[in-house]
Amino acid sequence: MALSAAKLGSSRAAPRMILLNHATVSSIHLKSSPRSIYARGVGPRYWHLSIVCKKEAGTSPTSSINKAPLQKDIENGSCLGLSSEEYNREACLDASERESTVSITVFGASGDLAKKKIFPALFALYYEDCLPKHFTVFGYAQSKMTDAELRTMVSKTLTCRIDKRENCGQKMEQFLERCFYHSGQYDLEESLAELDKKLKEQEAGRLSNRLFYLSIPPNIFIDVVKSASKSASSKNGWTRVIVEKPFGRDTESSAALTRGLKQYLEEDQIFRIDHYLGKELVENLSVLRFSNLVFEPLWSRQYIRNVQLTFSEDFGTEGRGGYFDNYGIIRDIMQNHLLQIFTLFAMETPISLDAEDIRNEKVKVLHSMKPLQLEDVVIGQYKSHTRNGISLGTRMIKLAEIRVQFCHVPGSLYKRCFGTDIDLATNELIIRVQPDEAIYLKINNKLPGLGMKLDRSNLNLLYSSRYSKEIPDAYERLLLDAIEGERRLFIRSDELDAAWELFTPLLKELEEKKIAPELYPYGSRGPVGAHYLAAKYNVRWGDVNTSE
């Protein structure tokens, strides 16, 4: 008996097939499930299929599962659907191997990203008891360093939670005891084989799961992956690789990088990280949309006039001049950070909260967009902010927000109260990603008194006032997801391809025509051309400040 159960509205080409022996089936029940993907905290499908089976006396159920492929799947880390008991039973692991361990190797351990973000995030996860019972952290770089020197370097960047300071020193010591260092070349299999020996010493015969974090320049990604896959991958657990941006400079280089990685890794082993996807307000975006009935009906062009994604810094390149000369702000921020936020904002309701269902909807958004045209882009560059050779003081603030400007009220009864500037009466929903995380809705309100005077007020959810718990760093969430095999917040290869297809034609045209950027004063609102561009589409830029 073959039974096909298809999900309504599913974009997948083929339904899942369930093969059953008709003699063992007693009854089949098909039941609809709630539409909300957040019902009961999980993402139910549209239909629930229940099968009641019976077992004849003296018979035993047969299985078509091939043990050899299953073992191969387990070694590749792709048996995420199995429970821990099934995993152990099917893999035929003995008692000593059923206790697993996770080994985390940070390539580029002496770099700024590792010191400022990765090691502190791992410690925060350990402090919150989010890491497995058995884990080891290895730093890997070309520079010579001892275990003690690594621990000293890492200890300078570790902090404890504001709301959990008890046993902070003790926790740090325990974490640092699990940190080790290995010096070696990135392109030599012998160096990775030596790392493999050290990892096995710490794993002590347990089921070994290994996570490699590539905090290194992209031109040596493939060398490291090649050497690690041959000499340092897990033989009885999963192996996963976190890849840092930039993922190439254009469509061609990105595709070449993907092909190179896939020579040695499966797609589900590659975790392309964009730390903006791990930020609290970005994570909350889909919750805001899909679990609040008040917003979902308004999320259409019928009610939304325009959406502005803003990334603003009031400091300069600050030592990153070489990086920006090579990649530029469009590749560094717009093609990944802002575009990723936009896909989450604009995607249709996914079938469930499963990683593939969410990423499928994000890819649909990218495919529905037209490549950027030069006439719709303004590029600018700020003038030097020095005076008499002395750098002027600034506050180092990064601001990132999503601003939704709704349409004007048709035939508004209170139009005369706002005068000729009807934009003052526009409702706005602002989701501030950083700093001072907040969600606020701008509404029109009557001022108290006998007269009829209107005021623009904010309904404000300021996270620091509403929640006492400190917001975790984005790297904490993403590292934990990678350890647990959750891919929802990581970028899939076809998603990356679609993103580059939008920007590559523009980037090539800018470089071929040598378009000169418009200069603007340091600390101002940006190039004047941006305001002309907004006026072309009857849009007014929102106020970029953190005091709204």
Image: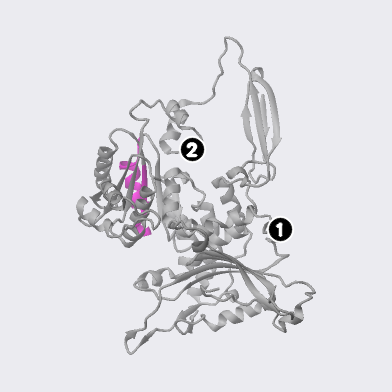
- Give the residue furthest to the front: 450
Residue annotated with mark 1: 297
Q: Secondary structure at mark 1?
A: helix
Pointer 2 local density, CA inside 10 Å: few below 14, some 14–19, many at least 20 = few
Contact (CB < 8 A) between labels 2 and 1?
no
- Give the residue furthest to the top: 58
Q: Which amino acid, by three-letter code, is at mark 1?
A: Pro
Pointer 1 local density, CA inside 10 Å: few below 14, some 14–19, many at least 20 = few
Residue located at (45% from left, 53% from top): 272
Side of 190 relative to 354 (left or right)? left
Q: Which amino acid, by three-letter code, is at mark 2?
A: Leu
Q: Which residues are magenta?
A: 210-235
Side of 365 relative to 384 (left or right)? right
Side of 292 relative to 218 (left or right)? right
Q: Secondary structure at mark 2?
A: loop
| Residue 537 shows in this picture | no
Position of residue 346 relative to residue 539, above or below, is above
Q: Does residue 231 show up magenta in the picture?
A: yes
Position of residue 449 relative to residue 281, above or below, is below
| Residue 159 x/y as whole percent | 33, 58
Viewer-side residue, 384 vs 456: 456
| Residue 44 x/y as whole percent | 62, 41
Viewer-side residue, 213 vs 285: 285
* Disc on res. 34: none
Side of 87 relative to 367 (left or right)? left
| Residue 180 x/y as whole percent | 25, 48
| Residue 289 x/y as whole percent | 63, 56
Dot 2 or dot 1, earlier in sequence = 2
What is the basis of the colouring in this image? one colour
- Which quadrant is the C terminus positioned in? bottom right
**How far is mark 2 from mark 1, CA to CA?**
35 Å
Residue annotated with mark 2: 80
